[in-house]
Amino acid sequence: MQALTAIFCKGLKHHIRYPGEFAIFLMLPFLFTFLILGMGDAVGGNNAAAYFAARTGTTNIVIYEILGSAVWMTSWVVIEDVGTAIRDEQIKGTLEQNFLAPVHRFTLLVGLSLTDVVITSILFLVVVGVTVAVVLPSSFLTVIPAFLALLLGLIPLFGIGFLFAGFVVRFKEPYIFIQIVNLVFATLTGTYYPVTLLPYWVQALSGVLPQTYVIDAMRRIVIANQTLVNLYGSIFILLALALAYPILGYAVFRRIERKASVTGEFSKY
Amino acid sequence: MNSRNISYPSRLIEEFRASFLKDIRSYFRYPAWVIGEFLSTPLWFFFFALGVTLFVPVVSVAARGTASTGISYFFFGFIFIVLFSTSVWGVGQSVRNEQESGTLEQFFLAPANRATLILGRWARIFLTDSLIISYTTVLLYLIGGTAVAILNPTLFILSVGLYELSLIGFGLFMAGLTIRIKAYNSIGNAIFFGYMIFTGALFPITVLPQPVRYFSMLLPFTYLNDLMRHAALGTTMILPENLEYTVAILASVAMLIFGFVAFNKIEQDARVKGSIATS
């Protein structure tokens, strides 16, 4: 527990020390939403909202897009933080000390993840909370169940983060790898559009990503006033993914880590 | 070959060639980055394009025309952004990269013109950007059936030339900025996003509120984007035609000169203060 707290505090200090990075993550969802709205207005003209409603079932474009943006940013933070944490330690030359400390690897990864729970919660509450308060104040309380859906979705996401942490130990090129993964996630999970717009085979891939269910559930909760109970199907899938991904991610990480400790991969960069 | 016998223009060409080849070698030394860039750049386009398709109808023939025009409009925005990123993240960051690698002193001590060294990098990025844009155009046709046609190729080539001149100038200014300001990423991001919103790259500036539109009309890139799009798609120009040509030419030349002057001035100041290699 002491080790977990220490890792958590260390991660938090890092974020506090570089507030500019966090500010960018706060701004990006608004910026991307604004770009989509601007482009939509340009191509759709006066009927843009009507065309949008015909595809999505809502005229509340801002809320629809900002929910997608916010979830995308949270997954971006998690994948980048957990995925690159090991690599950063490797570059700084502190990975060996960390791995030699009498701390279980799982504790190390969970500690990193807990920091991100705090960061992504702030990110979500500021971005979505402020937008809903301004655009749809009557639905402000729906932010709470939407936030619960996000928290549930974070668990499988951390599992995916563990998976990347392992790949990064092996392949050493985290930044471009993470950029592509974030973009693929954004494209597959329906960040700015319903996933039904994608070809069927792509929709099958969307189905194994937790963010797909989180974004859809949030839109139903905030825009269509549904409850978490109504969305039991999505919640059940998220629970299953919350079990599967951390186990899979940690198993892959351990396997790569064990191999790396034999081949001396840790000290290479 | 005795360098004293080489004329000044030949020397510049030789420096440019050496710098270009050096950048090509550095670029292909990291295949993961090459693959990543070639995958992620079109992916950004398709990701946003899918978002934009929600705002266009899909049922009627007329609607298909609208959608196709909309995607073409947006596609040129994507091209502008790819090219603009050359100046911010490519040319601008080149000095920062050398600074971080600890090779900036060697770079500046070489008996070569600074600008040609940086232009070598610009040329490499222009080449790879062109490849990425070309194959994204083919992908767009294969996947979406949208053929991107250029109505006035001569004017388009001329407008791209003007745009590139201004990008070189702006890139040199940004390269100078990296010597003076170390927190380059934040400034680069702010400029990049500012470009996307205020210069009509992705949507016409008429979408912006009136006071913001006045600000947009003060930015040279607004006219350069508008001119290229007009040449390609025949869109209505912001200014009367002849006036816009004049503004675009003057803006490009002014930015190019400003970039060279600013870069030299900042470099000289940094030499005096000894801040060139501080990272």
Image (cartoon, grey):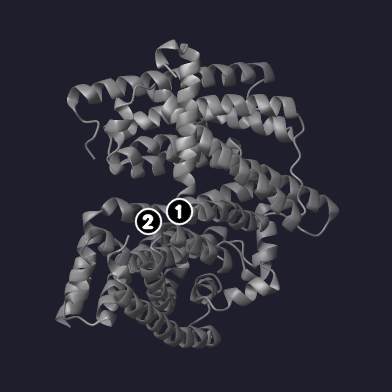
Q: Is residue A182 left or right of residue A155?
A: right
Which residue is at a point 34% across and 69% down the rendered structure image?
A82
Q: Mark 2 and mark 1 in contact (Cβ < 8 Å)?
A: yes
Q: Quadrant of the C terminus of chain A?
A: bottom left
Please name the amino acid that badge 2 sits on: Leu
Reading the image, the residue beneath label 1 is A30
Query: Which residue extends farthest right?
Result: B61
Determine crowd level at label 2: few under 14, some 14-19, many 20+ residues with C-alpha closer than 10 A. Answer: many
* Residue A123 x/y as whole percent: 36, 63
Are labels 1 and 2 on one chain?
yes
Reading the image, the residue beneath label 2 is A26
Mark 2 — on which chain does it sit? A
- The secondary structure type at the circle numbered 1 is helix
**Is A22 or B4 nearer to us in this picture?**
B4
* Residue A49 x/y as whole percent: 65, 56
- The secondary structure type at the circle numbered 2 is helix
Q: Is residue B210 visible?
A: no
- Give the alpha-carbon distance from disc 1 to disc 2, as whole Å: 8 Å
* Residue A213 x/y as whole percent: 53, 77
Q: Is residue B180 left or right of residue A244?
A: left
Q: Quadrant of the N terminus of chain A?
A: bottom left
**Is B212 or B107 nearer to us in this picture?**
B107
Which residue is at a point 75% across and 51% down the rendered structure image?
B141
**Is A255 or A57 nearer to us in this picture?**
A255
Please name the amino acid that badge 1 sits on: Phe
Which residue is at a point 20% across and 62% down the rendered structure image?
A13
Q: Is residue B67 visible?
A: yes
